[in-house]
Image: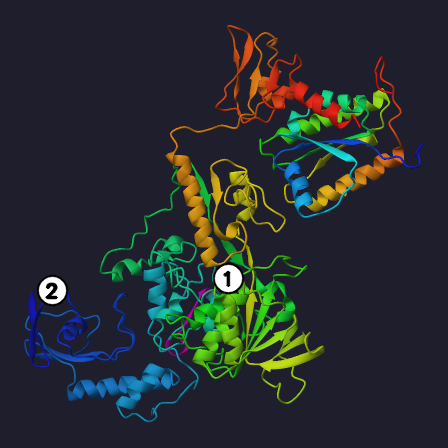
Amino acid sequence: MSQAGFEPRLVGFLCNWCSYTGADLAGTARMTYAPNIRIIRVMCSGRVDPQFVLKAFREGADGVLISGCHPGDCHYQEGNYKALRRYKLLSRLLEQLGIEKERFRLEWVSASEGARFQQVVNEFTEQVRRLGPLNFKFNGGSHE
Amino acid sequence: MVTVTIDGKKIQVEEGTTILQAAKKLDISIPTLCYHPLIEPYAACRVCLVEVSVRGRKDLITSCNNKVQDGMEVETASPRVLRSRRLNVEMLLARAPAAEPVQRLAREMGIDKPRFPIKDPNEKCILCGLCVRACEQVVGACAISFIDRGTERKVMPPFGEPSEACIGCTACAHFCPTGAITYEDKYGRQVIHSELYLGPSTAIRVPIRQAVPMVPFIDESACIHFKTGKCQLCVKVCDRQAVNHEMKEEEVEVEVGSIILATGFKPFDARRIPAYGYGRLPNVITALEFEHLVNASGPTGGKILLASGEEPKSVGIVHCVGSRDENYNEYCSRVCCMYSLKFAHLIKEKTEADIYDFYIDMRCFGKGYEEFYHRLLEEGTKFIRGRVSEITDLAVTKEEEGKLIIRVEDTLLGVVRRIPVDMVILATGLEPSVDHNQLAKTFNISCSQDTFFLERHPKLAPVSTFSDGIFLAGCCQAPRDIPDTVAQAGGAAAEALALADKASFSLEPVTAEIDENLCSGCQICVGLCPFTAITFDREKEISVINDALCKGCGTCVAACPSGAAQQKHFRDRQIMAEIEGLLLV
């Protein structure tokens, strides 16, 4: 399935307090990670509406990452648990739609884990690269 | 009141006073062995004999338990008294030849050797029963008593077996006048200069020598009163009546607008590096112990001494113990280089010792610090660049015998060296305080990778945290020295004041809102809100968000099936547009 020269396009939804700060730390610490990910900041991983994920796939993303605080560390007490619940459900829905579940990932990255963020992004990029481009046509969608 | 005459001196005393107490008021000393002012007299030793005459009738009685009578005439050193007392002491000496106070009395009376047979030359117990009385009257444990009779009489717990009634308070040993009862030091390692942590501690103590306020406290876990309900000797001896066993620690709830966390650090536990021998080799001490030792109000009065009481001829200071080490803590503890230099300087000032400093890098970053380092170099402190691999007392050569040998690779010379010294000071690093993780949970603040509290931004908000109104000061955020801590604490205080000074409080503008026209009243959002900011308006049958309570996480927005809930600055269409924009190319 994989194609030569394929660069996956990934969308990451990062919570403001842990993962976005962690990504920021990776940046200020001059850690390099795969440039394939495009980051959208949300206040909490609990803000990630399942529609955002579907929208991202629809717009041509090859993979979607949601990243929030470690369990128990949520700035809003329990938003990450809500994200986890939605992730479980949405994973099943995506599979039924024919999108491999490896293209959708939920990770806990704390504000101090710049190195972990780097590792997560690199791993995820490789994982999606192996899967190849998302071969999915939305009904009536404009996207090819 | 009764009037008595003791050795020709008249005195008026209260009724019920013992002869011994009356004599004491006249500064007449009567020798005793089994008397203790806090314990009921028992007249066991018979050394306090005096001759009394009441209405012309003379008698020899013990002074500790006999009370004065009106018109009593007492002679404390008549020939008859001295003769009888001498005989009693002679018998005591035969019974307990090793008891130091008996030996002293015998010497004073010119007794060289008792005429009576000595049963055990090492016996110290004079059967005075102070221990038994202390255990019963003071402690209330009644764990020991006299057993057997005559020459077989001795003090023992029941059946001579360890008693369950014994609470291990060691009061018996403390009251024993002859040192016949000893107890094992359960702290194991009793080194003169490690008193701060390891020495025996009493139930009433001042936590540390520089404690503020300088007030002793009662350690409930060690205090006899809290075990048996008795004792309270401290109440009896305190003239100021300051001791109160009823006092309880209490939890006080205080409402505040902001909180500054300054929970500090704990020193790295040097036992975690077994190769350095701390806890095993008595002359390997930590920096804090040395600080205690060298303190003028410390156990040695500021003298730098080895466990043997001698002055060290050479001292090694090992830097970076538990710091800059992948096995323990990767970070630099910042303060150790400078306090090690201070130690080297103090040792130079107070002793003739050779000083070796084992460092990885000298980090003299502050104002005047580099200059101080140069001064130390000029003073002749020997600096050896390299991490110490081992501290041992196993000598290989003759010079090493009886010394501590520091094995280190001298990275400037490129050789492994063995350096024998008398004392080793471990410059232990800094770690977050003991209940650090619990605190982080309580205040909902994150920790950075080095486990210290994480600031909101390293440059732009160094004293703030991700939780509004909670600020950081000092070593709970990262290891730092006193000047830096004071500066940061000032910053934190100013931030807290700035919050208090404002009449209004600005909220993050990212709160959620509900479009009345779109809300279907399904109430999914109500249960999701962790801050109970959403209520249901029964009249209008819509959900309503309280702006002051909403923290702006957006969980309700993500869950709203009708799209009525939206988060300011993070509206669905904004994020959708972001997704589109990001994936254009």
Report helix, strand or loop for mark 1. loop
Q: Considering depth in this image, is B208 or B231 the residue closer to the camera?
A: B208
Q: Is residue B147 inside the magenta stretch?
A: no
Q: Quadrant of residue A121?
A: top right
Q: What stretch is highlighted in magenta?
A: B150-158
The crowd level at tag 2 (other Cα within 10 Å; few <14, some 14-19, many 20+) is few
- Name above or below for residue A103 compared with residue B340: above
Residue B348 vs residue A24: left or right? left
Circle 1 sits on which residue?
A: B366
- Marks 2 and 1, how far apart in space? 72 Å
Whether residue B134 is visible: yes
Q: Nearer the viewer, mark 2 or mark 1?
A: 1
Q: Considering depth in this image, is B355 or B369 the residue closer to the camera?
A: B369
Tell me which chain the residue with mark 1 is part of. Answer: B
The amino acid on which the numbered mark 1 sits, given as a three-letter code, is: Gly
The crowd level at tag 1 (other Cα within 10 Å; few <14, some 14-19, many 20+) is few
Q: Quadrant of residue B365?
A: bottom right
Q: Say whether disc 2 or disc 1 marks the residue closer to the N-terminus.
A: 2
Question: Residue A78 appears at what percent x and percent y?
Answer: 61, 30
Residue at the image point whose x is 54% and y is 52% from the top: B478
Report helix, strand or loop for mark 2. loop
Circle 2 sits on which residue?
A: B15
Tell me which chain the residue with mark 2 is part of. Answer: B
The amino acid on which the numbered mark 2 sits, given as a three-letter code, is: Glu
The N terminus of chain B - image quarter: bottom left
Question: Residue B340 appears at what percent x and percent y?
Answer: 52, 69
